[in-house]
């Protein structure tokens, strides 16, 4: 099954999303075709990154059955892009999971979530929307993670934690169980 997708951000985080999509394409039946990067950086407009063109606006792609994902790690900026561009133009919004992530049967998840490789998801998790979970992160049982949260690489969230909207968890951060952040 082939699906067309745009990546909002041609910077390093957008390129990480491209790498994730390439790995999904390699290991799964779903095959994504990246139509382009969308980035307001005027120095990138019209250039190609890893063979994929950078556009300053998504208007060229306003047709049915196109997905969009925002790979920006800054939660506030990611929220702004979803609200002012991706949702405004009514793109479809997928969840992207690396193929080596085991999805627990008890997971409750929204849309627009990006989960990179070697992430451990425990049981009874509630992940809302537009969450970015980087490589080698461990999410403990019964966690509740709100919209636009970012977990950078090698972070760890203990069980029964609640992470509120637009929270940024830095690389290597260890959060003990029963903590509320936001």
Image (spheres, grey):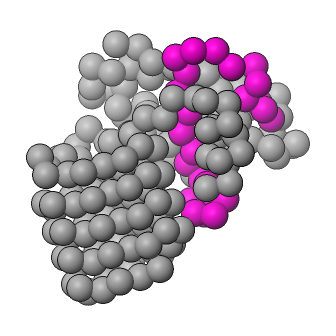
Residue beneath the point at 57% across and 45% down: 70
Q: Is residue 46 left or right of residue 124?
A: right
Residue 15 percent across, percent down from the top left:
57, 43
Q: Is residue 104 above or below residue 53?
A: below
- The stretch of residues the image draws in magenta is 55-78
Residue 120 in sight: no
User: Camera-side residue: 103 or 142?
Assistant: 142
Residue beneath the point at 53% across and 68% down: 166
Residue 75 percent across, percent down from the top left:
57, 63
- Quarter of the rendering occupied by the N terminus: top left
Q: Is residue 181 above or below residue 112?
A: below
Q: Is residue 59 left or right of residue 157?
A: right
Residue 144 in sight: yes
Magenta stretch: includes residue 118: no
Residue 101 percent across, percent down from the top left:
23, 47
Q: Is residue 81 above or below residue 148?
A: above
Q: Is residue 20 left or right of residue 40?
A: left
Q: Is residue 143 left or right of residue 67?
A: left
Residue 33 percent across, percent down from the top left:
50, 20
Count of numbered tags: 0
Q: Residue furthest right?
A: 42
User: Camera-side residue: 12 or 91?
Assistant: 91
């Amino acid at each position: 099954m082939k699906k067309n997708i745009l990546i909002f951000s041609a910077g390093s985080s957008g390129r990480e999303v491209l790498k994730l999509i390439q790995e999904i394409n390699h290991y799964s039946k779903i095959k994504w075709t990246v139509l382009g990067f969308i980035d307001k950086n005027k120095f990138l407009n019209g250039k190609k990154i890893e063979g994929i063109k950078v556009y300053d606006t998504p208007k060229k792609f306003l047709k049915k059955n196109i997905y969009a994902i925002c790979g920006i790690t800054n939660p506030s900026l990611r929220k702004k892009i979803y609200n002012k561009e991706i949702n405004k133009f009514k793109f479809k919004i997928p969840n992207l999971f690396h193929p080596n992530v085991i999805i627990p049967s008890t997971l409750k998840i929204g849309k627009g979530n990006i989960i990179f490789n070697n992430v451990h998801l425990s049981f009874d998790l509630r992940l809302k929307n537009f969450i970015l979970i980087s490589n080698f992160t461990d999410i403990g049982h019964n966690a509740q993670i709100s919209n636009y949260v970012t977990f950078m690489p090698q972070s760890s969230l203990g069980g029964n934690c609640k992470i509120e909207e637009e929270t940024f968890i830095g690389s290597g951060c260890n959060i003990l169980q029963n903590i509320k952040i936001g």
